[in-house]
Each structure stands twice: as structure tokens, then as C-alpha cells.
Image (cartoon, helix red, strand yellow):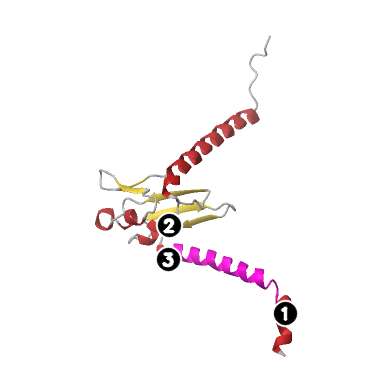
Amino acid sequence: MGKKGVKPSESTASDIFSLLVETSDKEKRKRREQLLSPLGVKEFFVDGSITIDKRTCKGVECKLCIKACPTNALFWRATGEVGIIEELCIYCGACVLNCIVDNCIKITRKRENGEIERFSTPRAFTILEHGINAKKRHERVRAVFPTAADYLKLYKPLMT
């Protein structure tokens, strides 16, 4: 005879919830892969979100964000607003760079290393990308010349 009135432990409930979330995430990733593979677009970000402020959007007047999107994730709705297909968005920032209104399109994206990036103006996006490129340049230089002492060992005899 089974025990009556026994509550499942919280860890069991949380395990079931995490399993459901995990399954949902796997299905989303699989769907994204199916949608993006014909486009030949590479994903650089683990996760992200994009929002458009309908109050400040001048969509009908400019249409620049829709034209700039490499995956066609932005589209016109019947109501005259710009719509977003989240499964197609790769959070590249092309829409933000082309938007004529600051803080209209907001993107939050997460890199594989866990770093979260947020931007909503072309200036913020450019500063972010410049910082990333500067880090890469410094890493390349350090790979060639790891320390000043090593540099001097190699080139000091030539200087004297």
C-alpha cells in the first residue's frame, strides 16, 4: 500500500521544470537552425532579445531597419508597424545601425563566454564593436610578442 499525502520534494519539482525548459530550448535551437541554414547565416550569440519602441518608430517613413536586416527578421505588419520574427533574428545590430531614431530598437545579446551586450544607438553599437576588435588586436599582438622582455631579447642586439 502506497503512502498517502506525501508531497514530492522541491528538488523533484524543480528537476521536472528544468527538464521542460531544457526541452523547450532544444526545440527552439533546432527550429532556428532549420530557418537559418538556407540563408547561410552564422550565429555568434547564444541568446538574445530585440524590441522596437512603437511610439518612437518612424517605420513607414524610413523602412531602413527592414532593408538592413540580413535574415528578414523584421517585416511590415498590416497595422503599419514593424514586426519581429524572433526565430530569424541573429542580433547582429544592422537594424540599430540603420535606424534614424536613437533608442527605438533595443538589442540584448549573450555571447558564448556569458558576456551580455546591450545597445540601442548606432554610437553604442560602434563603441561596443570597436572595444571587441581592440581586444582581438591586443591578443594577436601578445601572441607575436608575449612580453616586453621577450621583444627585447629578440630585437635589442639589432638596435645597438
Q: Is residue 137 magenta?
A: yes
Asked whether 107 or 145 is in front, the reply is: 145
> Mark on residue 123?
3
Q: Position of residue 78 (x, y in %)?
A: 25, 43
Q: Nearer the viewer, mark 1 or mark 2?
A: 1
Disc 1, SS: helix
Magenta part of the protein: which range?
125-149
Separation (CA) of disc 1 from disc 2: 43 Å
What amino acid is labelled 1 in the image?
Answer: Leu
The residue carrying mark 2 is 93
From this viewpoint, is residue 87 visible? no
Q: Quadrant of residue 154?
A: bottom right
Q: Say if 132 sits above or below 92 in the image.
A: below
Q: Estimate the x, y position of residue 51 in percent, counting from the top left.
A: 40, 50
- Which dot, 1 or 3, sits closer to the camera? 1
Distance between mark 2 and mark 3 Cα atoms: 11 Å
Looking at the rendered structure, the number of numbered marks drawn on it comes to 3
Q: Disc 1 versus disc 3: distance between alpha carbons?
A: 41 Å
Residue 154, numbered label: 1
Element marked by disc 3:
helix
The earlier-in-sequence mark between 2 and 3 is 2
